[in-house]
Image (spheres, coloured by chain):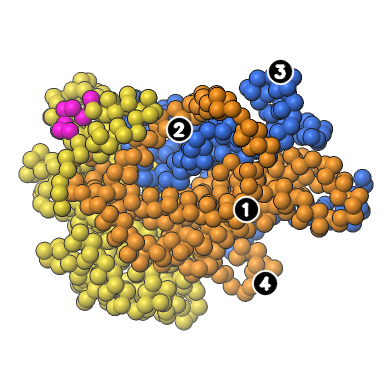
Chain colours: A orange, B yellow, C blue
Amino acid sequence: MTGLRRAARKRPTGARMEARLALVLLLPSVVVVFGIVVYPMLRTLLISFFNVDTPFGGRFPFVGLDNYTSILTSPDFWATTRRTLYFTLVSTGLELVLGIGLALLLIAPLRGRWLLRALVVLPWALPTIVNGSLWRSIFDAQYGALNAVLTQLHVTETYHAWLGTPFMALNLVILADVWKNTSLVAFFLLAGLQTIPRDIYEQARVDGAGAVRSFFSITLPLLVPSISIVLVLRTIEAFKVFDIIYIMTRGGPASGTQTIAFYTYLQAFSDQRFGYGSALAYLIVVIILMLSALYLRLLRSNEMSAL
Amino acid sequence: MSHHDLSAPNPSIVALSRRRLLGLAGATGIGLTLSACGIGGGGTSSSGGDNTGTINALFMKQAGFSEADILAMTKAFQGVNPKIKVNPTFVAYEALHDKTVAAAPAGTYDVVLIDVIWPAEFGSKKIVSDVTSKYPDAWKGEMFGGALQTALYQDKYYGVPWILDTKYFYSNKDLMAKAGVEPASLASWDGVIAAARQMKSKGVVDYPLVWSWSQAEALMCDYTQLLGAFGGKFLSDDGSKAAFNSGGGVAALEFMQMTLKDKLSNPSSTQALEEDVRKVISQGQAAFALNWTYMFGMANDPKESQVVGKLAIGQTPSGPAGRPGVNGSMALAVSAGSKNQKAAWTYIEFLTSQDQQNKYAKDSLPVWKSSYTDPAVIETNPQTVAAASKQLDSMILRPTVPNYNAVSQKMQAEIQKCLLGSKTAQQALDDAAKAADDILAS
Amino acid sequence: MKPRRSYLVFIHIAAVAVAGLILAPFGWLLFASLSSQNDLLARPLSWIPRDPTLERYRAIATTSGADVAGAFRTSLLTSTIVAGSTVVISMCVGVLGAYAFARLRFRLRRMTLALFLSTYMLPPIAIIIPIYLILSTVGLLDSKLGLIIVYCSFVTPFVLWIMSNFFLSLPQELEDAARVDGCSRLGALFRIVLPIARPGLFATMMFAFLLAWDEFLYALVLTSSSNAKTVPVAIAEFTGRFSVDFGLVAAGGVLASVPPVLLALAFQRYIVGGLTSGAVKG
């Protein structure tokens, strides 16, 4: 937009000044972030080319890309990746749709709106470790709340093993994740909604646009930057999902909920195959980058998004 | 395959990482790590140290000896050894393995508590020290055979057994009386199954059996127990190949599958951990279960249980090949990176001494045979001690191989596939064996 | 403009439904924290506890720090300090950097931002051993400061990215006007941009706080005493090797969700006040 055009007009000295100012403004972030993670990141990258099976330093056989090729030819890896992609796409998709609805509700002229806004923080504020136990106990085959409710309302006759089959368990873990993280999505979209000037809507109303049309022609397009933020944000988190799996199902039944981060944890830590685990970790980064790039391309809001 | 030296020899390691850190502080040293060439990390030098100094010890919370017990033992130890200072640290069981691994290069802890399935891994990767030479000969006769193997890997001791545990067979006396089942019939698995069928046909309980068969180590513990009873073997004699996919190994899994198919086992077993088994038993909703020592105490606590006084604890039923119990013990080990090997050993010796173990027997049973005839020990928990003195002498280990975790995960997944009905026992174990062979060969 | 009546009815029904969906599982958590084990395991379940107990809350409030319940009390303070400091540091450095990404042109801008973000794409489990080693070398293991440093390293990239997007979505004209009036770039940032970016700042701040509040794996491995154990670690310790008291975990969860909600309440009213005043009208 204007920023671009203006920058293009700048004389070279101005550009150099801008670059220098950018460096100064970015330096604190560079120190805070890379001061601690640059060594671990590079070490992990280096290790991924070696056959490392202890946490200690020492001499290790260099294996080139062997770790990567053996991962990419392992059926376990592809099964886990498919499962994780399913988890990521379904959970972020649901969170996005529900989050948009919730955000619209949170900005609507409700009585006691502040109360609803506070309430919405509640699931987000619950530590994942508790959220996992909570849903595990709701779905418990013997003493779960869901079974109690359904039988007492005579919807079902007997108690059901909700987490007993692999695919059902995966979907229920998604449900638990959506319950917690829709709040986060709604909060970001609420912030986005709040920056949309009111008078645009009034203008549209004068022009005779209904609520549905003004949602699709005004709200949604102007919300795209916020949507791309939450989409990428949730994708990174969902693709790395670990805690809630560990607590709700430990990857079972029959590995039906084993996601890639959980698989990496087992390889790198439980089995101490650090080389293999490091290669897995970088493959995760690659997949997330690809997913994010895809989203941002689809949502490409031109210069409106910084990435 | 070429070998690259990726880190400097021991003495310079600390200096090397400091230098590296200084570079990092500059935050622009991108090429630095690669040129300094380090997959570095601390060393494993075990300079013995004299019998003084500070020891950091890693324990777990909420299981076995209580935190208060350990603090009291430590206080008593410092009374006798004023030159050694001990800093005990308590973490959740879940954190023990990962913390021990993460802390190894930095050498944070001198004494670590290790689970029975870790000595092969920790020993072969030199995370804990070989203490065989420090074992007095007398211990080998005075400790339970089952206890001694807890820290044993390839004929070397990597720690001293401290928390002794195995799964016992629990039965609900009330439900048995209702169905007219004789306690003596529970001596064998055949008898247990007959009793379960009788209970089911009389409508005493919907599912007489409940197990911890969720995809977790808990499943391996139950499978190990049954594999032992049915005369199976995990590995070939030289330890290089999987052997659980023939004979008793398959029979054990077929047995498990049968109890689910015939609706003798609670179907929620495939998602249950030990704690879920305890809940079902403590509500009187199952008659028989395998579980660790801890369940007996909790099942007799009126706040937690509806079956107070109704539960019997006994030796596990025998199969065609006997009745060995699964070893679920833990040991204290000296970490290889400790600068105070001697002091750490002195501390371990004290904590595992018969004197100390008898004193706190209420929370965790001693590893010493003669303790089980000591009236003071018996008095703490008469029924458990009686069951333990029989069960503890014969125990079966899960495979002692360095990458046991990887083998275990494969087996858990395949066994679950069988239990959920998508594979036959033979097929599931064949698949697991194939994967295990690859892991063992790597 | 007056909203239609049917619309008002609809949003109020929707609000009640949302509240129900949020409160039902949370109510179960509260119920579990107040029920005895026997009540929780009863079949059929009685929704009014026959034997209600405040024992777990009492244990958390009164027992000594050595007890797991007492240690949870300390961890609430630790987590507040750690998450609070993380927010302050990462917001301060992140907002400056975000402004650079949003308004300044320099080479490799997108690349730099992607590099920042990719640090968080790496699963923590892959880098925890070297991080442990670094903290151990500089003597910051098991300390709040060590955790704060680690947390800032993964919270800051998000602040950078989120805030730069928010800055971009704000109209440039206001800033231009201020600069014509003689404001420096930074002057415009603080006087013009930040005040109108408040909704975004607030959402980012909540996000940063909760990211640190919820973090589990680093805290589990990097802390070992009540010095630095955070809320999730303390809750994990309610669970023994084989035994789990879900009621106590539930009580911990109920208490752990209070500080973030209070934070949201406190900041929200302040934010909402200045929000629709039309500052954005370009």
| Residue B51 left/right relative to A174 | left
Q: Main secondary structure of the magenta part?
A: helix
| Disc number lying in front (2 or 4) | 2
Q: Amino acid at mark 1?
A: Leu
Looking at the rendered structure, the secondary structure element under dot 3 is loop
* Residue A142 visible in rendering: no
Q: Is residue A207 magenta?
A: no
Label placed on residue A155: 4
Q: Position of residue A225 (x, y in %)?
A: 65, 46
Label placed on residue C182: 3
Residue found 20% across the figure and 51% down from its top: B120
Looking at the rendered structure, the secondary structure element under dot 1 is loop
Mark 1, residue position: A299
Binning the other alpha carbons within 10 Å of mark 3 as few (below 14), some (14 to 19) or many (20 upward) gives: few
Q: Amino acid at mark 3?
A: Gly
Pick whichever of labels 1 and 4 is earlier in the sequence.
4
Q: Amino acid at mark 4?
A: Val
Provide the residue span drawn in magenta. Answer: B8-15
The reply to the same-chain question for discs 2 and 1 is yes
User: Which of C246 and A138 lies nearest the eye of the viewer?
Assistant: A138
Binning the other alpha carbons within 10 Å of mark 2 as few (below 14), some (14 to 19) or many (20 upward) gives: many
Q: Position of residue B356 (x, y in %)?
A: 24, 36
- In three-dimensional space, the C-alpha distance between marks 2 and 4, rounded to whole angstroms, equals 53 Å
- In three-dimensional space, the C-alpha distance between marks 3 and 4, rounded to whole angstroms, equals 70 Å
Looking at the rendered structure, the secondary structure element under dot 2 is helix
Mark 2, residue position: A33
| Disc number lying in front (3 or 1) | 3
Residue found 27% across the figure and 64% down from its top: B224
| Disc number lying in front (2 or 1) | 1
| Disc number lying in front (3 or 4) | 3
User: Which of A21 and A4 lies nearest the eye of the viewer?
Assistant: A4
Q: Position of residue B264 (x, y in %)?
A: 42, 76
